[in-house]
Image (cartoon, rainbow, N blue to C red):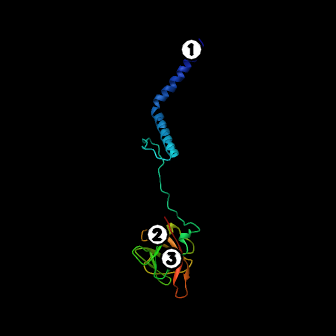
């Protein structure tokens, strides 16, 4: 007789568990589906490829590839490729590709006369200077006016290239004796 109350209790407990599973079947299916999605992503990452099919939406947010926000500050120190650029009188510079050229339809600034930048091809250089490297936001929100700009050493000037990229330029020295034959400068284009 003692076995029947224990057996009855086990059957009753099993019935409650089974009933709760039946009533929560959608919750269990969702949990299983989410576990499978995570497993597929982990397997794909381990193998080095992406799953061939997108998992079915179940209210579970899958990680997505998002581009990193653009950097607000330039590296310090600047890379060697962005420092000590020599620009002689009559030459033009394209901040987008870092090339010194003759004046053309691609360059951003032209050293038209000794220590004088001319803005070219809708590029903009700010005559408002800072003593330290400005941020990307500062240059995007800066004041820009048309016209030639006199260059002074060790003052940072924001620019927006003719391709719409923000950055800054800082003249480090004049070349030659008065009248100067060119300048050396450092620059940075925020990406």
Residue 119, horizontal then vertical, whole percent: 44, 77
Q: Is mark 1 on a helix, strand or loop?
A: helix
Q: In this view, does 141 lie above or below 181?
A: above
Q: What residue is shown with label 3? A: 128
Q: Is residue 45 above or below residue 104?
A: above
Pointer 3 with pointer 1, Cβ within 8 A: no
Gap between marks 2 and 3 measured at Cα: 24 Å
Quarter containing the N terminus: top right
User: Could you say which is closer to the camera, residue 161 or residue 139?
Assistant: 161
Q: What element carries label 3?
A: strand
Quadrant assignment, res 77: bottom right
Q: What residue is shown with label 1? A: 4
Mark 2 vs mark 1, foreground winner is 2
Residue under the point 51% across and 72% down: 168
**What residue occupies the far bottom of the structure in this picture?**
178
Which numbered dot is residue 157? none
Mark 3 vs mark 1, foreground winner is 3
Residue under the point 52% across and 23% down: 14
Residue 112, horizontal then vertical, whole percent: 45, 82
Q: What residue is shown with label 2? A: 97
**Marked residue nearer the N-terminal end (3 or 1):** 1
Pointer 2 with pointer 3, Cβ within 8 A: no
Residue under the point 46% across and 69% down: 97
Gap between marks 3 and 1 measured at Cα: 93 Å
Residue 74, horizontal then vertical, whole percent: 54, 67
**What residue occupies the far right of the structure in this picture?**
2
Query: Crowdedness of circle 2 by 10 Å Cα count: few (<14), some, many (20+)?
Result: few
Query: Crowdedness of circle 3 by 10 Å Cα count: few (<14), some, many (20+)?
Result: few
**Marked residue nearer the N-terminal end (2 or 1):** 1
User: Could you say which is closer to the camera, residue 32 or residue 102?
Assistant: 102
User: Could you say which is closer to the camera, residue 12 or residue 102?
Assistant: 102
């Amino acid at each position: 007789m003692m076995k029947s109350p224990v057996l009855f209790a086990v059957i009753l407990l099993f019935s409650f568990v089974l009933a709760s599973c039946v009533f929560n079947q959608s919750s269990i299916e969702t949990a299983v589906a989410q576990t499978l999605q995570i497993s597929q992503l982990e397997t794909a990452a381990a193998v080095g490829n992406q799953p061939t099919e997108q998992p079915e939406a179940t209210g579970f947010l899958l990680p997505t590839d998002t581009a990193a926000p653009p950097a607000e500050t330039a590296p310090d120190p600047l890379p060697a490729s962005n420092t000590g650029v020599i620009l002689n009188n009559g030459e033009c510079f394209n901040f987008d590709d870092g090339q010194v050229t003759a004046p053309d339809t691609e360059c951003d600034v032209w050293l038209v006369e000794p220590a004088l930048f001319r803005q070219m091809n809708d590029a903009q250089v700010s005559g408002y200077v800072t003593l330290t490297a400005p941020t990307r936001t500062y240059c995007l929100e800066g004041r820009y006016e048309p016209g030639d700009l006199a260059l002074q050493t060790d003052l940072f000037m924001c620019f927006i290239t003719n391709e719409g990229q923000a950055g800054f330029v800082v003249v480090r020295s004049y070349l030659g004796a008065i009248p100067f034959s060119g300048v050396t400068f450092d620059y940075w284009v925020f990406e």
